[in-house]
Amino acid sequence: MKSLLLMPAQYSITMQIKQLLKNSYNDCIILDFRPTLNKWQIRINTQMFRFPDKLRKKWEHFYFKKINQWYIKQFRIHKPNLVFIYNNEMLLPATLKWLKEKKMKIVFFLGDNPLYTPTSRYNLTVLEYADAVFVPDTFWQHQLLKIGIPNVFYLLLPLPEEQYFPVKNLSESEKKQLQTDILYVGMSYNDSWGYKKAKFLSFFVNNKLQIHGNQAWKRWFQFFPELEPYFINKQAFIPVEKLNKMYNCTKIIPVDGNPGIFNGIHLRILEALSAGALPLMEFNADMDFIFKDVSDLPAVKDYRAIPEMVEYYLSNENSRCEMIDKMTHTYKNQFSNKLIADYLINKIDIK
């Protein structure tokens, strides 16, 4: 049995999903189209949604065709039983129709809401060809089922403990360089979601805050000047190994609501717990059952409650560590590697 995993190779969850699939597939191969393209092509495509549709269609005819021709070549070489796709990975409906004719099983795992992500005009169309669609947000599940997409299942991944874990051998120089009380790593936005993110972080300001992010953060410093001294401009992707060390050297990870996440939780929560840091979160409805055994969950429904919560956990190390342990234990009871692997394969219905 062979599966192809269409997903960015650099994502930490890529290896997680590969391991889950390998429970039923002896051979699981990651396909990432990005190395086959020039960097300028990828950069242009990320901004193409801003252009008039006539121009965008001309670009897509070139860009999507190039990617899908490469995919079909790979499908012919590998002859998989299963094609497992993250988001849309620039697939065209015609390519998926071809896969269905070849009797290959098609499964999607959505990391972004297809109704709010401008990566492809075919975000929803491609899901019509799926044998199963997995989503990490109950509201997404409700939306997709309502419009008639069949076999939409809720799925959270296990804790990413192979990528994020307590590091025992950090050098003194690393500790000195990376040590913080509060650490935020993430991009900002040029619209109101960027303002919201900056407002959220403004309630975490203390002398040992670090914000690692992109250029878009700077436009919000006129409204939240208190953030600027703690901002570090990071245009490049931070490797998982370094990010894990950064999480190891902090106490609190702020986790705000993402534009596309309505009820679900951000993967940063799982990364923080695995590395031994406390996620202090903006509340979302799915947390009620994900962390059902944690009565005093560090999740806020009003940003104004953040400073008091931050002060408490920075002043009470035992309570901070106990909360990390409690959240980790509760999560693993419901979403262990074995439970998720069995659930995933059952829903895909592989016999």
Image: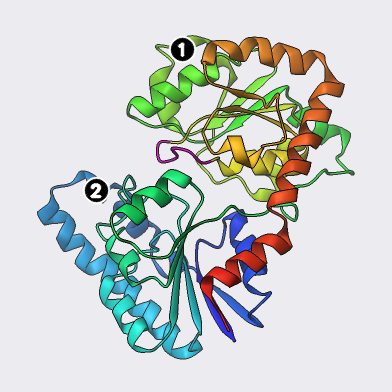
Mark 2: amino acid: Phe
Query: In the rendered image, which residue does mark 1 sit on?
Result: 224
Quadrant in which the N terminus is drawn: bottom right
- Rendering quarter of residue 188: top left
Is the stretch drawn in magenta largely helix, strand or loop?
Answer: loop
Q: Position of residue 40 (x, y in %)?
A: 35, 56
Instruction: Determine whether, in the image, residue 84 is placed left or right of residue 275.
Output: left
Q: Which of 139/109 is in front?
A: 139
Q: Earlier in the sequence, mark 2 or mark 1?
A: 2
Is residue 262 on the magenta stretch? yes
Q: Position of residue 207 (x, y in %)?
A: 68, 12
The disc at residue 49 is: 2
Mark 1: amino acid: Phe
Colour basis: rainbow
Tell me if residue 267 can be seen.
Answer: yes
Residue displayed at 44% across by 16% down: 221
Instruction: Determine whether, in the image, residue 95 is placed left or right of residue 317.
Output: left
